Image (cartoon, rainbow, N blue to C red):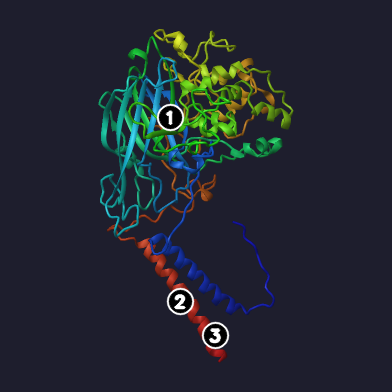
Amino acid sequence: MTMRSFHLPGRKPASRRAERALASVGTLALVGAAAVTGLAPATSSASSHREAPMTSGDPRADNTDVYAFTSPDKPDTVTLVANWIPFQEPNGGPNFYPFANDARYNIKIDADGDGKPDTTYTWEFTDHIRDSADQFLYNTGVVKNLDDPTLNFRQTYDLTVTDSTGNRRTLLDDAPAAPSNVGKASMPDYASLRKQAVKQLPDGGQTMAGQTSDPFFADLRIFDLLYGGNLSETGHNTLAGYNVNTIAIQVPKKSVALKGDATRNPVIGVWSTTDREGADVTGGKGGENADAVDGKGTDGQAGAAPDKGGEDRWRQVSRLGNPLVNEVVVPLKYKDAFNALSPDKDASVTPVVNAVKDPIVPKLVQSIYGVPAPATPRNDLVEIFLTGICKACGPIKADLNAQQLNKDANKSAIVPAEELRLNMSVPPAAKPNRLGVLGKDLAGFPNGRRLNDDVVDIELQALEGAAQTGKIVPALAAGDKVDTPYREPGDSFPYVALPNTAAVNQADALHPDGGVGAGLGGDAFGGGFPAGPVAAVGGGALLACAGVMALRRRRAERV
C-alpha cells in the first residue's frame, strides 16, 4: 500500500482538525476491533517460498524445506524434518495456520536407489473445534495444556508407515499437534505445549507436528538480478521472524536402511510430498503441463499422475528434496509438472535433466558479474542432485552419499533421481561448518542437510564449479552474507526453534521479540473472557463518540 499526502486548499483551525481526527481514529479503532472480534469480516493473506506457480497459491500444500541428518545427541538414529506453509506472519489470526485436513503430508525414503520410496511416513490431520457456533477465537483464555478447554481449535493426526510393497501400518492414532503460537498472553509457556506434542513411536523414535520458527535463512533479494546486480543487496535474512509448520520424525537408522542394515547400506534418499484429494497441479486436461510423465509427451514434459496403490483419488501436488532445485534449476514452464513427478521418472524428463547439466544460474552470474560459467555438461551437478556422490558416479572423486555405495543395492536398478541423500555412517561433526562438504565437513550438505547448513551459499558455489575444483569461487565467497538461521536450533529433538510471536515488521536485531506479543486469541486475565478485544471495541466506540459529539457542539455553536 502506498501512502500519499494531500494538501487541501484552506486550513482548518487546530481544534476542528483535532475533533475530526478524534472521530476518525475512533471509527478506525472500532472497525479494526470489530474485525478481530468477529463483528465484521477480517481478511488476511498468506504466502510461501513460492517455488512453483500452483503451490504459491496453495501454501498449506507447499512443502518448503527438507532436512535429514544423523541425530547429534542420538547417533544411532536419523532425524528427518519437513516444513510447510512458510512466510507465516505470527500475528496472522484469528485462524492462524492449521495443517490441511484434506491433504496427506509425506516423508519418503529411497534406500535402494530406484527412485521409489521404500519407506513412506504419512501424517493426516483432523480439525477439532470446541465451539464453532458461538465463538470465533482460536483460544478463549490461557492455554497451559494441549487438552485445555481454552484451546478452542486444535488438530490431531494419524501417522502411518508404508513399505515398498504397499503394506501400511498405523504408528499413531489421534496424536495431538502443537498449536500455532498465538502469543505470550495466550500461551505463556509454549515450550511446554511443544514438549507435550512430542510423541514416542512404537518401534522406537519419536515425532512432532506443529509450528516452528522457519529455519531456512537467505537473502531472497537474489531474485533482484542476483543481489542487485552489484552484490549491494545482501545481508538481510528475508525469512527472519516468520514461522512454518513442521513435521519431524526421529527413527532408528535400521528402520530406513536397505534390508534394515545401516552398516552395510548406510545411504538413503529423502524427499517430502503433499497429496491433495482430487487435485491436479497441471490445471486439468489439455493444460500446458499435461504431457504424460512416462516421456510420451512431445517435449518430454512431466504432467500429473494419480497416486496408484488403490488410492487414485489422491494427487501429488508438491515435492521437495534438495533445496532450491525447483526454484532456480527447473525452468518456469516445468515447475508445476516437476512437483507432480515421482523421482524415478526424473531421468526420463529431458528438460529437467538438461536444466541440471546446463543450469541457468551460472549464465546469469556471468552476464551480471563477469564470472565465467563452468563448461557444460555439468556432470558434477548430476552427481550432487541426481545420483549422489561416488567415484564411479561422475567427475567428483569421492565416495560420499550415492546409493551405489550400499552393499546390498541392485546396481542395475539404480536411476538418476532428485533426492536429498544422506550417508548415515558419517558421524555428527563436533564443530559443524555452515558450508558442509565444501567446508571439509562431511556431515553437512549435500550429504543430507542440517538446520544450520548454509545451502544458498553452498549451492551458489556448487553451481559456479566449486565441487569440481574443491575451492571456493573468490568472487562469490561472501555469498548472501546471511550465515545463520534467525533462531538457533535446539540440542535435542525436534531441534527446530520455537515459533516467533512478534510481528515480522517488529522482529529486528534491536527488538528480537518485537514490540508486542502476537494475537488476540486470549489474555492474561484468565476465565476465558476476551478482555483485550472487548476493550478495543469499547475504546474505539468511546473515541468515535467523543469526536462526533465535539463536532456536533461545533455546529450548534455556529447556529
Quadrant in which residue 531 is drawn? bottom left
Residue 444: tell me if it is visible.
no
Gap between marks 1 and 3 measured at Cα: 66 Å
Toward the viewer: 273 or 367?
A: 273
Q: Position of residue 104 (x, y in %)?
A: 37, 35
Residue drawn at (60%, 11%) of the image: 395
Toward the viewer: 417 or 372?
A: 417
Toward the viewer: 255 or 522?
A: 255
Residue highlighted by disc 1? 272
Which kind of residue does numbered mark 1 sit on?
Answer: Ser
Q: Secondary structure at mark 1?
A: strand
Residue drawn at (57%, 10%) of the image: 397
Residue drawn at (69%, 75%) of the image: 9
Tell me which numbered mark, 2 or 1, is placed earlier along the sequence. Answer: 1
Tell me which numbered mark, 3 or 2, is placed earlier along the sequence. Answer: 2
Instruction: Tell me if 152 is positioned left or right of 556 in this view.
Output: left
Residue drawn at (46%, 54%) of the image: 516
The number of discs equals 3
Find residue 335 and name its label. none
Residue highlighted by disc 3? 554
> Mark 2 or 1, which is nearer the eye?
1
